[in-house]
Image: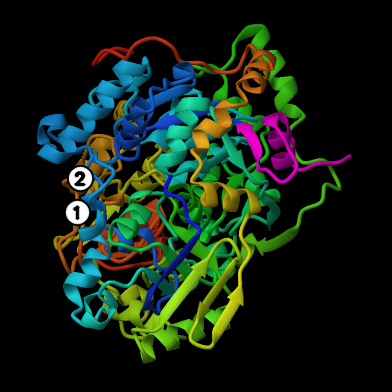
Amino acid sequence: MEAFRRHEGRMAPLDRANVDTDQIIPKQFLKRIERSGFGPFLFYDWRRNDPGFVLNRPEHEGATVLVTGPNFGCGSSREHAPWSLQDAGFRAVIASSFADIFRTNCLKIGLLPVILPEASVRRLLELAGEDPTTPVTVDLESMTVTAAGFAERFEVDPYARECLLNGWDAVALTLRHEDEIAAYESRRGGWLPVVSGPSEALGSC
Amino acid sequence: MSATLAQKIWDRHVVRSAPGEPDLLYVDLHLIHEVTTPQAFESLRMAGRRVRRPDLTVATMDHNTPTRGGRAAADEVGRRQLDALEENCRWAGIRLYELGSRHQGIVHVIGPDLGLTQPGLVIVCGDSHTSTHGAFGAIAFGIGTSEVEHVLATQCLPQRRPRDLAVTVEGELSPGVVAKDVVLGLIARAGIAGGQGCAVEYRGSTIRGLSMEGRMTICNMSIEWGARVGMVAPDDTTFAYLEGRQHAPRGADWERALDEWRALPSDPGAAFDSEIRLDARELEPFVTWGTNPGQAAPVSGRVPDPADENEERALGYMALTPGTAMQDIAIDRVFIGSCTNARLEDLRAAAAVLRGRRVHPRVRAMVVPGSALVKLEAESEGLDRVFTDAGFEWRDAGCSMCLGMNPDILQPGERCASTSNRNFEGRQGAGGRTHLLSPPMAAAAALTGHLVDVREVMAEEVAR
């Protein structure tokens, strides 16, 4: 995972509530088997149908911090959503709340979801709208967001923060506990379901 | 100390617990499909890792699969994804129920079909509707591709304990009001983020009185109001459903399992962090009018005045005028299917409305059984004939038009009465407009060509 310590960039204000992952990346782009290259499909329908959409506006080109409404990333578990944001250059998303699976997916790939109170998000939306060149700094070490005359602390799961700051491989961390996993497995009930053997032949039972 | 159902299952699956760290939770069953796994296998291989427990992993093809014409009908990119799943399963020794096999189907339909979904398990899948399996009294939740890789490699996931939320539904449902209406009514009230961070336990006499299929419909849509987990305590209905299924325990194992399962329900006095109470007698058939599942109204109601910009935007997308009676909304398409409502009971309920009648000439209607097995069972009861005689298309199992990743999609501007779970913009096809409702309500809409109260349609039938 890409480490995240501190990022300075410009904001894209997307003032909508409940933005679902079907909007972030529509289903027709989920058939690819690669992990990269999803950026061009970010908010595909909104970008295509609405010339005034925030990511179509030249003044927000190159923005790397998305500021948006509550419950961002609701719906499908597709990690393609954070992949597409990251691939399009975003390093952090600021909202007053996130859907659980989306937030976890972001944390796993080093795209920082920052939760701020509704009024603070509103202030950032205004700042970005008034002057799109306003620089914003998202600092995970000090857990603060700062922008012109704006400074606010945010909370983040301490363990997730540690992983992000160091860019740790979560799988490797778990594999360090191999002994405990094996011990757990030896205690599991013998009647629990297992499915072994090759794939079922076509038409068979 | 008294504990909730979720707490009991959680505690039994903690592999490791350390201060400041999330619990490391063991996964009993990992369901996988073609869309959210290719990148996980790729990363696994690049890191030189293996699949730890292929015997606790089961694969099927469902999301991008065509519902007629088999694999050959998939587009090239979709076929590559199906090929990748096949290769990955072969590489890792994972059982795959591929297109054409007797047990292929929507991943959340085949788990219960096969008897793999059992009480007390931790079940994950790279799909948000994994909460469906909670109907059996399991902790089941959707995960992203990085977590799929994590489970493939370790059979574990680091997880923070969710809050416990009780949803208590009491009273008898009126005729024509079904599980889908309970959950749509609940989401309309609780809001689409109301369950965030929670393990929801659905309880009360209404829930107890539901079949496993009805419970699955409700648990399925837990994610639509943001819940991490939705579950129902296992009881005799659960055990009767499971007994004799392919992977259900047998003989002495069955007795042993029953003892364990009977100890799972929340203890009397177990503390929930919060509770929502619903009176089932007040519920009507619900239909959505907007672009998220919480934007729903009783079918007897009207399209509301928009309360904010988001609702205004939703009405604009749906091309609806405030004040319009819900029953005056004409539809072009009907879709009966999805992991929410494509089980045998759902098909029976829709067929009961359609029997001996014809779909409105303007409407194109299709029914997509949730699994190959459900399709076979329905055919053995003659349900396929009821649907086709009424003018429905009878398709092969898959996710189909629920998410429009396969050839089954709406055309721009088309309006669909759908038994699926999401009415997001473009969900069923770019520019398509979705109204979520129950299988009997979808069948009634197919007959009349507009949204309609199924109870009125059935009353006319009786009068005839």
Q: Give the range drawn in magenta.
A: B1-25
The reply to whether discs 2 and 1 touch (Cβ–Cβ < 8 Å) is yes
Question: Which element type, helix, strand or loop, lies under badge 2?
Answer: loop
In what quadrant of the picture does the N terminus of chain B appear?
top right
Seen at 50% across and 17% down, the residue is B247
**Is there any visible trace of residue B419 in the rendered image?**
no
Q: Which chain carries label 1?
A: B
**Percent coordinates x, y for residue B29 in the rendering:** 51, 27
| Amino acid at dot 2 | Asn
Query: What colouring style does the render use?
Result: rainbow
Seen at 23% across and 16% down, the residue is A202
**Is residue B177 within the magenta segment?**
no
- Quadrant for residue B463, please give it: bottom left
Marker disc for residue B434: none
Q: Is residue B452 above or below residue B238?
A: below
Q: Which residue carries the number 2 mark?
A: B406
Q: Residues within 10 Å of mark 1 (few under 14, many from 20)?
A: some
Give whichever of B210, B311 is nearer the camera: B311
Q: Is residue B183 above or below residue B132?
A: below
* Mark 2 and mark 1: Cα distance apart in space: 7 Å
**Percent coordinates x, y for residue B345 in the rendering:** 44, 39
Residue B371 falls left or right of residue B332 = right
Seen at 37% across and 46% down, the residue is B352
**Is there any visible trace of residue B147 in the rendered image?**
yes
Q: Which residue carries the number 1 mark?
A: B409
Q: Mark 2 lies on which chain?
A: B
Residue furthest out toward the bottom: A130
